Amino acid sequence: MESLKLNTKYLFGKNAIFELEKELSNSKYKKALILTGSSSYKTNGSFDDLTKVINKVNLPYIHFLGIEPNPRSRTIDKCVDFVIENKVDLIFALGGGSVVDASKVIATLATNKNYYESSWDYVLDSSLAKNKPIDIISIITLAGTGSENNGTSVITNSEKWEKKSVYNALATPIISVQDPSYTFTVDAWQTASGIFDCFSHLLEQYFGKSTFDWTREYIFANLRVLINYAKMVILRPLHFEARANVFWTTTMALNGLGSFKCESDWSVHTIEHAISGLWDVTHGAGLAFVTPTYLEIRSQNEQWFKDKVIQLGRNVFKTQTLESTIKFIVDFIKSINLPTRWSEFGNIAKFDEKDASYLLNHSCRFGEPSMKETYQKVIWALMEKK
Ligand code: NZQ
Ligand code: ZN
């Protein structure tokens, strides 16, 4: 038996946000929070549009700004208190994946605060949070994570240099507003990182051991669309159709459809989260750095995995061998100007054996203990990629 419930209603297209008026008229909500990052909300048009809609339906609101990229548990703690004090019953999460991820933890702790000292405690053990979170409407302004339509949050504890995911299906946004024109202002680095994040979500769902034909073909189709439009959105950031295709692919890549009836293998994310926890790197760029090495090392050791890499190359990249498939991926990463070596990250000054041990411990603690040997080989090989 398989079960899949897609919990999110999508409002997609130019000016889609104004459809919210219908959704919110005569609604039960008494006070809303608009949650944002530090400044992009002012320039991409989304905040002005949202406040017009909220004012029109006479919904009182307050604003909390300053959710960081790789959102910090300490900032989330402050926002939880703010939400409880102000009796907020609806959150508009307006921003990239970091804002939407933070909103889910805030929404959950707003109704489960009694069980936890801090948001980090919740991230470490979410089992006590049984009360339904307050509702979230996501207004995504950066295409990549898929956070707008899933229950996952990835939170960083910067005091401990740790980054970990936590899942609550009930915190999945009930509505996702998707106006591709809000992503026109995203710079080339973040656009490329979002694209590679999605690329990796598709690959990591594909690289589970089990297979279901429909799911495999769904992944291949999404990869083709993503690759077709990747360079175009970077060269022509105001190209609506290109932004729209990338946007919808990133959303559809992480909502349950890409893993239907299949296992996934989240090792690349596990290693990247360790790297991000230590050096605060941009998530998608970190995945680009890890992926080719991961594919090389697993293919050297496991025939079934190697066969899957070759199958991917044949079906999506129109190439025949293991080497040419990995080369295609490396060329793709370079074509969108993401790093393939640690020295290309401005914030990794050195990467030595002490760092490698730290990354391994983090990966084993939050990842799959059975993958320890693979994590170790990959991390040690990455250290050599200067
Ligand atoms: O803070 P502001 O000023 O908003 O600027 C942000 C931020 O600096 C900016 N930005 C967002 N929208 C923009 C824009 N700049 C110009 N124009 C716009 N329209 O972009 C920067 C990065 O934002 P962030 O939200 O951090 O990026 P992203 O969407 O890539 O999210 C990354 C986070 O999501 C987690 C990652 O680990 C990382 O912490 N993930 C969440 C997942 C999930 N919930 O399912 C899955 C992913 O695998 C991922 O791990
Ligand atoms: Zn990701």
Image (cartoon, helix red, strand yellow):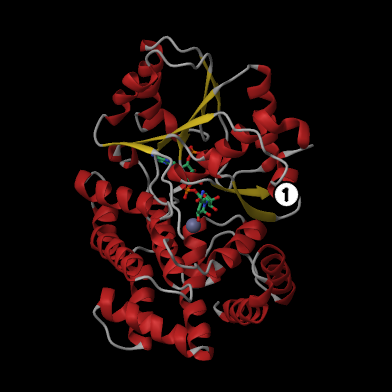
Q: Quarter-wise, where is residue 8 in the image?
A: top left
Residue 115 in the figure: left or right of residue 289: right
Which of 382 and 226 lies nearest the eye of the viewer?
226
**Picture quarter with the C terminus:** bottom right
Residue 69 in the figure: left or right of residue 214: right
Which of 290 and 344 lies nearest the eye of the viewer?
290
Mark 1 — residue? 125
Name the secondary structure under disc 1.
loop
Q: Please identify the residue farthest to the front as the structure is shown.
A: 1
Which residue is rendered at x = 56% and y = 69% of the image?
Answer: 267
Image spot of residue 364 (x, y percent): 70, 69
Which residue is rendered at x = 60% and y = 67% of the image?
Answer: 271
Image spot of residue 139 (x, y percent): 41, 34
Which residue is rendered at x = 45% and y = 51% of the image?
Answer: 145
Q: Please identify the residue farthest to the right as the structure is shown.
A: 117
Image spot of residue 184 (x, y percent): 30, 41
Image spot of residue 374 (x, y percent): 61, 80
Q: Is residue 282 visible?
A: yes
Q: Amino acid at mark 1?
A: Asp
Q: Is residue 338 visible?
A: no
Q: Quarter-wise, where is residue 108 in the image?
A: top right
